[in-house]
């Protein structure tokens, strides 16, 4: 696979506000509005510690990306830093793993959105999913600024909803509700802060960590701004802390209002808490926000996959055709191919739900952790070279290498914990198999290129 022709470049029309909200929107999704119920069910109030630990890991990963972006600006997204830190094999593997993960995400989000629309629109699931994918594909084809504006307002709605929920919840707790003393007594009567023991906070990590991933999308979007490195650093410094505030703050308000034992796994605890406050139409409002979160994630998934193909083509890790841009300066072929690939996964859920679709879901589940692991190892390798060369870094990961290796250990620990859980063991095994397949594919392509040169 040859590199794409020179002169092909993406637009640089995204603004810092777009990057910030894309990063926030990448993490605040259905995972917090619905998925948090499963984590609360596992750990009770100790889930706040779980969210703090997972948020700290994501914060360190973003700090690593900020350090590498300022040290070597112009490299591209985090897959370029993986190649720079560990070698071409790491860039190839990271990019294809990330692409694989997000293609499956296109299908998952399209299916979720279609299921929410089916009670209102009398069409089969696959047809509604196709319409959603087509709509977001058109948004991405129009221009990157259009994508940025969609994500800005999608993310703004989610942020406004969470802030409004927290404000209303605090008013109930300290104002018009039964009073703080009664709520505190109810909290104590359900086992206090650690009803399942401290270990439950760690048991819930595999559930929580996946809902908090996605902030690295900002590093991909930042490439299409006028100052990529500084926008990555800005996201690393502020966005993750805001996200931790939104997650921990909203879950704390829920636990103060709603006894954790009453939380039903798979049902939105936000709706349950608002029902106690007696907010009319709470379920409809949260449902609309969840649908917005789904469409937002679908929109970002198509964006991310197309940019992964573009960046890989620029390095010669994908066919050169994916490295060309349309007159609107977007990688049109990558956008269309990614949308079609996502729809193909949707069809697999219809025609082979218990075989192919299940395999795709399971094999993509832990790949994002493998990506984070490669990012962490890349930062360690690159930082050592920079320190050895005596280069001055304006942005650093603190207490290097202790913090960096702690992040590596944390990611490996999550993978081990998942491997010990019967319902997630296959997911880890298949994801590691996909990881090995990507590494093998790189060396196979490299060997073929060498043979072609000799011939």
Image (cartoon, rainbow, N blue to C red):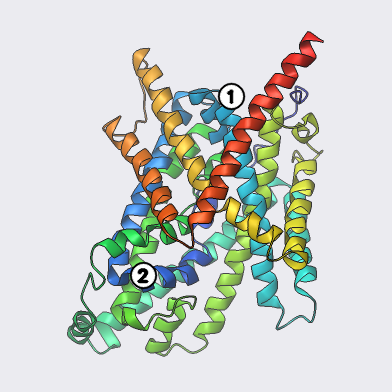
Q: Residues within 10 Å of mark 1 (few under 14, many from 20)?
A: many
Q: Nearer the viewer, residue 135 or 401?
A: 401
* Residue 361, horizontal then vertical, whole percent: 61, 57
Pointers 2 and 1 in contact (CB under 8 A)? Answer: no
* Residue 209, horizontal then vertical, whole percent: 43, 55
**Which SS class for mark 2?**
helix
Q: Is residue 437 visible?
A: yes
Q: Quadrant of residue 410?
A: top left
**Which SS class for mark 1?**
helix
* Residue 271, horizontal then vertical, whole percent: 46, 81
Q: Nearer the viewer, residue 245 or 297?
A: 297
- Left or right? Give the position of 271 relative to 289: left
The quadrant of the rendering that contains the N terminus is top right
Q: Residues within 10 Å of mark 2 (few under 14, many from 20)?
A: many
Residue of label 2: 42
* Residue 36, horizontal then vertical, whole percent: 43, 68
- Left or right? Give the position of 146 relative to 363: right
Residue displayed at 60% across by 68% down: 292
Q: Quadrant of residue 8?
A: top right
Residue of label 1: 88
Compared to residue 148, the image places residue 347 above or below, namely: below
Compared to residue 175, the image places residue 151 above or below, namely: above
Report the Cα–Cα distance between label 2 and label 1.
41 Å
> Reading the chain from its start, which is encountered first: label 2 or label 1?
2
Q: Quadrant of residue 450?
A: top right
The quadrant of the rendering that contains the C terminus is top right
Residue displayed at 41% across by 35% down: 64
Compared to residue 109, the image places residue 8 above or below, namely: above
Residue displayed at 23% across by 80% down: 187
């Amino acid at each position: 696979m040859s590199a794409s022709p020179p002169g092909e470049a993406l637009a640089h029309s995204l603004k810092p506000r777009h990057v910030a909200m894309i990063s926030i929107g990448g993490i605040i999704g259905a995972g917090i509005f619905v998925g948090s119920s499963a984590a609360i069910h596992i750990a009770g109030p100790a889930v706040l510690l779980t969210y703090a630990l997972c948020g700290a890991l994501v914060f360190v990963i973003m700090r690593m990306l900020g350090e590498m972006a300022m040290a070597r600006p112009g490299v591209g997204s985090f897959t370029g830093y993986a190649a720079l830190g560990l070698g071409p094999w790491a860039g190839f593997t990271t990019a294809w793993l990330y692409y694989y993960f997000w293609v499956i995400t296109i299908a998952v989000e399209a299916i979720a959105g279609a299921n929410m629309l089916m009670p209102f629109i009398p069409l089969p699931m696959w047809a509604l999913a196709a319409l959603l994918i087509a709509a977001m594909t058109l948004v991405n084809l129009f221009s990157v600024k259009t994508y940025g504006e969609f994500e800005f307002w999608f993310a703004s709605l989610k942020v406004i909803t969470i802030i409004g929920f927290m404000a209303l919840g605090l008013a109930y707790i300290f104002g018009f509700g039964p009073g703080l003393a009664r709520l505190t007594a109810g909290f104590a009567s359900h086992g206090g802060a650690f009803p399942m023991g401290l270990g439950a906070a760690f048991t819930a990590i595999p559930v929580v960590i996946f809902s908090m991933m996605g902030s690295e999308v900002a590093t991909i979007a930042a490439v299409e701004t006028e100052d990529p490195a500084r926008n990555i650093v800005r996201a690393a410094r502020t966005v993750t802390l805001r996200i931790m505030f939104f997650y921990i703050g909203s879950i704390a308000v829920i636990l103060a209002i709603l006894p954790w034992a009453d939380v039903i796994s798979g049902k939105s605890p936000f709706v349950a808490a608002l029902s106690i406050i007696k907010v009319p139409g709470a379920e409809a409002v949260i449902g609309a926000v969840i649908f917005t979160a789904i469409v937002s994630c679908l929109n970002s998934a198509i964006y991310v996959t197309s940019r992964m193909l573009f960046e890989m083509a620029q390095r010669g890790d994908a066919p050169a055709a994916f490295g060309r841009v349309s007159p609107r300066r977007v990688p049109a072929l990558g956008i269309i191919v990614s949308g079609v690939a996502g729809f193909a996964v949707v069809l697999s859920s219809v025609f082979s739900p218990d075989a192919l679709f299940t395999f795709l879901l399971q094999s993509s589940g832990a790949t994002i952790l493998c990506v984070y692991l490669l990012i962490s190892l890349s930062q360690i390798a690159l930082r050592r070279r920079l320190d050895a060369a005596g280069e001055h870094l304006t942005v650093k990961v603190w207490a290097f290498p202790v913090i960096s290796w702690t992040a590596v250990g944390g990611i490996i620990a999550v993978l081990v914990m998942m491997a010990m859980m019967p319902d997630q063991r296959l997911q880890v095994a298949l994801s590691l198999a996909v990881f090995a397949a990507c590494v093998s594919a790189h060396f196979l392509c490299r060997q073929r290129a060498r043979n072609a040169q000799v011939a």
